[in-house]
Image (spheres, helix red, strand yellow):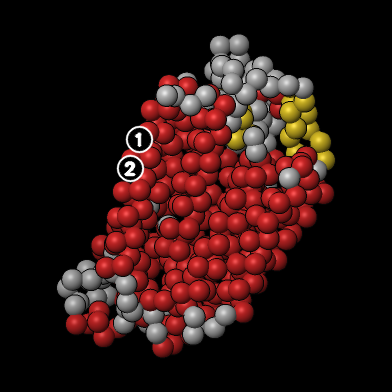
Amino acid sequence: MMLDYESLRLIWWLLVAVLLIGYAVMDGFDLGVATLLPWVARTDGERRVLINSIGPTWDGNQVWLILGAGAVFAAWPIVYAAAFSGMYVALLLVLFALFMRPVGFDYRSKMPQTAWRTTWDYALFVGGFVPALVIGVAFGNFLQGVPFHFDDTMRSFYTGSFWALLNPFALLTGLVSVAMLAMHGASFLLIKTEGVVQQRSLTASRIAAIVTIALFAVAGFWVANGIEGYRIVGTLDLAGPSNPLNKEVVLAAGAWLDNFRHYPALWSVPVLGFAGAAIVLLLGKGKPGLSFIASGVSVSGIAATAGVALFPFVLPSSTNPSQSLTMWDATSSQQTLWLMLIAALIFMPIILAYTSWVFRVLRGKVTEESIRANDHAVY
């Protein structure tokens, strides 16, 4: 028997959140390792250690991004259309940066010249740093509202520009993203490396944890005191047809904290962001697995904090707040959500089981000696 429309909408909000957080956790440490590449590794051998620590799994981890984007397209087609068309330049920037990863991994060690390898090292850095920054910037703009609106025929119009996305608050959230993923990547390197590289990774994880805590706190203070949030006034038919034009939304100072005020238990979500980073800061290299779990908890907590604050908004409109897109009025049909839920219940366990198996098979340290012994079989 098909679930009711209201329940399906809520379930799909949770599923999309899980997929996007899954991307932040699973591909986040890949982006973090690439971001740290110029600093943690200083010789060609050390850089090959870092590259091969994520080389076997980075492409599989990126599947979470495809799943997340696909879920947004299927569950919230209006959101997909408005966000992807409005932020087209920013998304292309992310895609072109991600293009640097496969070619960087494959071509970097094909030739022995230092200039050749250094060029690809910085290409891999771009492929890690730019997506982390731009995705964080995007969430900063979501919290401020995106300049789009609809006409009477439900065509969306974006009235902003790429440079307007790079405003002070959005750049702050972008730096939060870079810092937390650098922390996550450094924590992963504690598991996969040894010796001087591991020691530098420990230092990097602690510095990134401090920066993450500080920037996350500043961003939270800014949201509470410097940004007007969005609030639905009146009643909204939670099981009615999807029509983002049938509601009234007002801007109010501190409105993004409404959910935390109404449900105090939700304060545990940002607490996890702070606590995970604090554990990373306090732990040494003697417990790398626990440090990696803690950094994953921190990444999840920080990402979930943004989702909880926005709920039920998915894409707020700064041009016409009442045309903001929410999880209640921007979804696909009830039948579509139900069929996709069945597919998700079948395939998600398979993906999780396969991912777990891959990481179990590929466990263990990556060393310069192992790379020299398998020089033609590794990156």
**Residue at the location (49% across, 47% down)?**
18
From the viewer's perspective, is 379 left or right of 76? left
Tag 2 residue: 347
**Residue at the location (44% across, 32% down)?**
73
Bin the neighbour count of mark 2 within 10 Å (Cα to Cα): few under 14, some 14-19, many 20 and up: few
- For this rendering, which residue is in front, 196 or 193? 193
Can you give x and y, in whole percent of width and height, for residue 222 in the image?
A: 77, 52
As drawn, 268 above or below 55: above
Occupied quadrant, residue 66? top left
What is the secondary structure assignment of the residue under circle 2? helix
From the viewer's perspective, is 189 left or right of 362? right
Residue 82 visible, this angle: no
Can you give x and y, in whole percent of width and height, for residue 232 in the image?
A: 74, 28
What is the secondary structure assignment of the residue under circle 1? helix
Occupied quadrant, residue 359? bottom left
Outermost residue on the bottom side: it is: 195
From the viewer's perspective, is 126 left or right of 222? left
Q: Which mark is residue 241?
A: none
- Marks 1 and 2 sit apart, C-alpha to C-alpha, by 6 Å
Can you give x and y, in whole percent of width and height, for residue 248 in the image?
A: 74, 22
As drawn, 297 above or below 201: above
User: The disc labelled 2 sits on which kind of residue?
Assistant: Phe
**Residue at the location (68% across, 22% down)?**
236
User: The disc labelled 1 sits on which kind of residue?
Assistant: Ala
Residue 337 visible, this angle: yes
Assess whether mark 2 and mark 1 are in contact (beta carbons under 8 angstroms). Answer: yes
Bin the neighbour count of mark 1 within 10 Å (Cα to Cα): few under 14, some 14-19, many 20 and up: few
As drawn, 110 above or below 64: below
Image quarter (top left, top right, bottom left or bottom right) of the C terminus: bottom left
Tag 1 residue: 343
Occupied quadrant, residue 251? top right
